[in-house]
Image: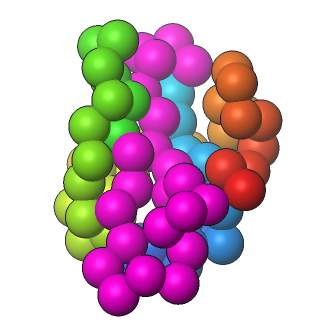
Amino acid sequence: MSQIAKKHLLAGIVFGDAETGEYIYLPGGEVGTDQPLCVFEHDGQKEDVDLDRAGYLVDHLTLKKCSHPTLGKRSF
């Protein structure tokens, strides 16, 4: 699943869980870079994570496609 999650992140899809307040997305400024960094929002913080780690977190935390409170369904 993480390969699919990574492709979705690269396409701007937001993954998250509104109950826990955890979200992962790829900011528009990272599109087309050699090593894109995603944003992992949790516990009121924002943390940069590489694409492989983001794919792992989507699976491990069982995050689903969702609508971010600020960004909506897509990050760009």
7 and 71: which is toward the camera: 71
**Colour scheme of the picture:** rainbow
Q: In this view, does 71 lie to the left or right of 46?
A: right
Q: Position of residue 31 (x, y in %)?
A: 55, 74
Q: Residue at x 72, y 56 (%)?
A: 76
Q: Position of residue 45 (x, y in %)?
A: 30, 20
Quick check: 56 above or below 40? below
Quick check: 41 above or below 37? above
Q: Quadrant of residue 29?
A: bottom right
Q: Residue at x 26, y 37 (%)?
A: 47
Quick check: is 12 in the magenta stretch? no
User: Can residue 59 be seen in the rendering of this structure?
Assistant: no
Q: Give the range drawn in magenta.
A: 18-39
76 and 74: which is toward the camera: 76
Q: Position of residue 3 (x, y in %)?
A: 41, 80
User: Can residue 26 be seen in the rendering of this structure?
Assistant: yes
Q: Which residue is drawn at 27% across and 47% down?
A: 48
Q: Position of residue 50 (x, y in %)?
A: 25, 64
Residue lying at the far front of the rendered structure: 29
34 and 11: which is toward the camera: 34
Screen quadrant of the N terminus = bottom left
Quick check: is 27 in the magenta stretch? yes
1 and 48: which is toward the camera: 48
Q: Which residue is drawn at 71% across and 35% down?
A: 71
Q: In this view, does 36 lie to the left or right of 8?
A: left
Quick check: 66 above or below 50? above
